[in-house]
Image (cartoon, grey):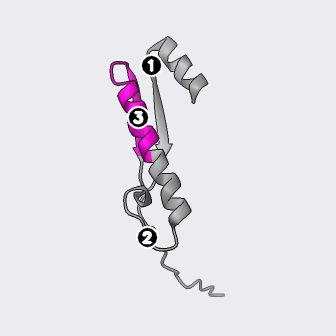
Amino acid sequence: MKIAAADFKAKNAGHVINLGSVAGREAYVGGGIYCATKHAVRSFTGTLLRELVNTNIRVTEVQPGQLIFVQIPHTVTY
């Protein structure tokens, strides 16, 4: 990140995109390590955003939620 930030600062342009999760905001049973690391991503993104606020460098965090998979039966007709 330090190298990319230095390059972005030199150009005064760039876009940092971090992949977080709603688990970084709402913990769940059994997700201690995952939730903690996603909270760290959220904190890092917020800090970076504040450090770069007076530049043309954009900072984004994508926070997907829980995915629900629906199994569709596979049928083959001959």
Q: CA distance from mark 3 to mark 1?
A: 18 Å
Q: Is residue 75 above or below residue 15?
A: below
**Horizontal side, residue 71 vs residue 63: left or right:** right
Q: Mark 3 — residue?
A: 47
Q: Mark 2 — residue?
A: 28
Question: Residue 32, position in %: x, y?
Answer: 51, 65
Mark 1 is on which residue type?
A: Ala
Mark 2 is on which residue type?
A: Tyr
Q: Given contact means CB atoms under 8 Å apart, are the residues at marks 3 and 2 in contact?
A: no
Would residue 70 be counted in the magenta stretch? no
Mark 3 is on which residue type?
A: Thr
Q: CA distance from mark 1 to mark 2?
A: 37 Å
Q: Quadrant of the N terminus?
A: top right
Give the secondary structure at mark 3: helix
Q: Which residues are magenta?
A: 42-61
Of mark 1 and mark 2, the one earlier in the sequence is: 1
Of mark 3 and mark 1, the one earlier in the sequence is: 1
Residue occupying the point 38% across, 38% down: 46
Farthest right residue in view: 78
